[in-house]
Image: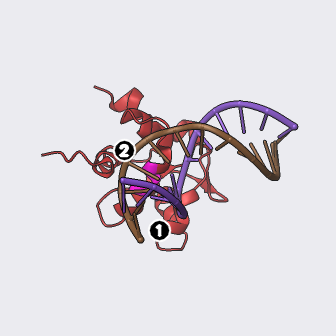
Chain colours: A red, B purple, C brown
Amino acid sequence: MPENGFFSKVFKVTEQIPFGRVTSYGAIAKFLGASGSARIVGSALNGSNKENVPAHRVVNRNGLLTGKHHFQGTNLMQQLLESEGVKVRENKVVNFEKHFWDPNRELKL
DNA sequence: GATTTGACTACTA
DNA sequence: GTAGTAGCCAAAT
């Protein structure tokens, strides 16, 4: 059964992110009905490292890999994104709008 | 139970 | 376009 914890919700949505796509914390927060809790999404992903959640597909609204430091400490996040077809330049996602995936828009329903 | 913190976002200068 | 400040909410201490 689904857990009501905010973290679990974030994990669930993050797991639903399609291949080669990225999204923002605010988008996930909004999808969960907690718009404004973007920071909580980041905190949740902080624990996602232990889960099978592709947290590397979640970046800030600028497409900047703000959480790359929270990974293994190296450029693993960027490597993963590039490995999925998402080009990264200076810790920023290239064509962010193009790779942007909005759960409210595509995952909805 | 109160205080602090944080992988953010938006507004203003 | 960049820089700084404020607002926001949930989890951890």
Tag 2–tag 1 contact (CB < 8 Å): no
Q: Main secondary structure of the magenta part?
A: helix
The residue that disc 2 covers is A17
**Element type at mark 2:** loop
Image location of residue A91, percent across then percent down: 62, 59
The answer to whether one can see residue A78 in this image is no
Q: Nearer the viewer, residue C6 or A91?
A: C6
Give SS at disc 1.
loop
Q: Residues within 10 Å of mark 2 (few under 14, many from 20)?
A: many
Q: Amino acid at mark 1?
A: Phe
Q: Is residue A14 above or below residue A76?
A: above
In the displayed orientation, state which residue is furthest to the bottom.
A73
Asked whether residue A18 is drawn in magenta, I would say no
Residue at screen point 33% across, 43% down: A13
- Is residue A68 shown above or below B12? below
Q: In the rendered structure, the residue with mark 2 lies on which chain?
A: A
Question: What's the magenta region?
Answer: A40-44
Please give the chain letter of the residue carrying mark 1.
A
Identify the residue under disc 1. Answer: A71
Q: Kindly identify the residue that appears in the image at 32 percent across and 47 percent down.
A: A6
Q: What's under tag 2, amino acid-wise?
A: Ile
Disc 1 residue crowd, few under 14, some 14–19, many 20+, Cα 10 Å: some
Q: Residue at x 46, y 35 (%)?
A: A35
Q: Which one is in front, C4 or A90?
A: C4
